[in-house]
Image: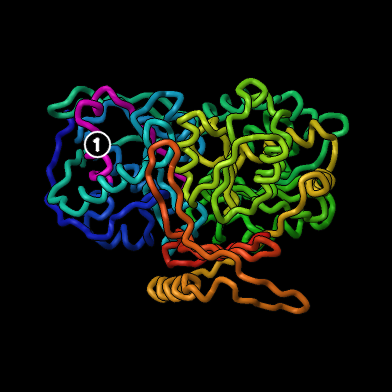
Amino acid sequence: MTKITVVKTKAYPDQKPGTSGLRKRVTVFQTNEHYAENFIQSIISCIEPAERQPGLLVVGGDGRFFMKDAIKLIIQIAAANGIGHLVIGQNGIMSTPAVSCVIRKLKAVGGIILTASHNPGGPTGDFGIKYNIASGGPAPEGITDKIFQISKSLTEYHICPDLKVDISKIGKQTFEVDTFKPMTVEIVDSVESYAEMLRGIFDFNALKQLVSGANHIKVRLDAMHGVVGPYVKKIVCEELGAAADGAFNCVPKEDFGGHHPDPNLTYASDLVNAMKGGDYDLGAAFDGDGDRNMVLGKHGFFVNPSDSVAIIAANITCIPYFQKTGVKGLARSMPTSGALDNVAKALKMNLYETPTGWKFFGNLMDAGKLSLCGEESFGTGSDHIREKDGLWAVLAWMSILAHRKQSVEEIMKDHWNKFGRNFFTRYDYEEVDSDKANTMIKELEAKMFDKSFVGQKFSSGDKSYEVAVSDNFAYTDPVDGSVSKNQVRDGDKKASRERHPSMGHGCGGYNSVSTCS
């Protein structure tokens, strides 16, 4: 019989989770007594007591430093709070898209994901704890606010400190817990449920011909030592037959090999340089937890994220899943360029412009209004789950290549000729002081919202621009009526240029500015 211990604790005032959960430096979790335990208890306290014993909770992470320590605590605290069934990825590994998939497949009450996404890992890096709800999507503000309120007043947590589980062995283990019915901890193959889902979405025979048939293309995939490595190996290499020597950095590491697992031209420069050599036809990189992707063509031809989702939308019917379900609508985040708008208009599809945050897409999906969506920060996804999905996006691109029998560059240029080309760029300012960054944003808002700003003219070289509009983007959710504000933008009369400053998710703080026309 496993005994429950009640541990007295003090509340912390800073455990407010965002859309991407609670992210802090690893040292915050390690050096502040009961810090992780408090937040885990606050999450589980949000689950109604009547739902805990019959309910199932999915747990997985991206392999970063402190993940296994956190999983140990989750098991012990879940047991002490009456959770009846935990499903955990083998060795704790499970990508964010896979967690969403498993939550939906098993009809779980929710899931806990241990990740800080594309942020650096290791002892001096970042760590995060994120709660997803029964839909498989990130917890909405109503739930994250509840978690925060609980965390601010917490005086104790319940734990079974003697409960030990070997998460390296696949199978079920049952434990007798004092005052509760037996608890089941099930360790599962991290890849199989997700792979099964993809088989139902894409034509794997066509993809196999593309990457391993008589006239196959060469692909180079860089998992950046994040969680996607095992998925690339099993699905793309073993099942589809792509050459194993085209899969790089596929062993998850606690510090991501000392690199920043962010799939962009800066941090995935090894992939960019390799693609420039012309030996590979398709290249892709993935972030730490597997929900972001970057696509490259031969000779390093870069597909920006805004164009990527537009290309998938324009060719969506070559994916069997959408042939069956139809296309309910398209959506992009506000900072993303209008490339998707051009496709929606030409193909007469509904388009939604949302604030940054995947939860807004999830609401539209749950209401049956949305099939495909994307954001400028290298996130692309569809209603097959409720998270963005990096490997899904790359298989979507492979489906387009197989169907059109053209190169990435040819497809992109044909698209521009048909739908027009939108210029887009993004600038990230990392490790900046958060207070100073917020001050800068406030000063920028004051300047932009001054009545005299509209009508001002600015020149660069031989071009001049007149400000036509300057506002704070507001979004009224068509599903629940909630209103979201606080993303700044301005536009000029000639090129509809927009600028969108915002605070990002880096624990050291960063600003990002996107411009598009």
**Residue 168 found in image quarter:** top left
Image point (43%, 67%), residue name? 508
Residue 60 in the image: above or below residue 497? above
The residue closer to the viewer here, 457 or 321, is 457
* Residue 288 rendering spot, x and y as whole percentages: 53, 50
The residue closer to the viewer here, 332 or 146, is 332
Q: Which residue is mark 1?
A: 163
**Residue 173 found in image quarter:** top left
* Residue 379 rendering spot, x and y as whole percentages: 57, 47
Magenta stretch: includes residue 44: yes
State left or right for residue 25 relative to residue 412: left
Q: Amino acid at mark 1?
A: Leu
From the image, which quarter does the N terminus lie in? top left
Looking at the image, the residue that sits furthest to the top is: 324
Q: Secondary structure at mark 1?
A: loop
Image point (56%, 26%), residue name? 197
Q: Is residue 160 visible?
A: yes
State left or right for residue 508 relative to residue 241: left
Residue range corresponding to the magenta coloring: 40-63
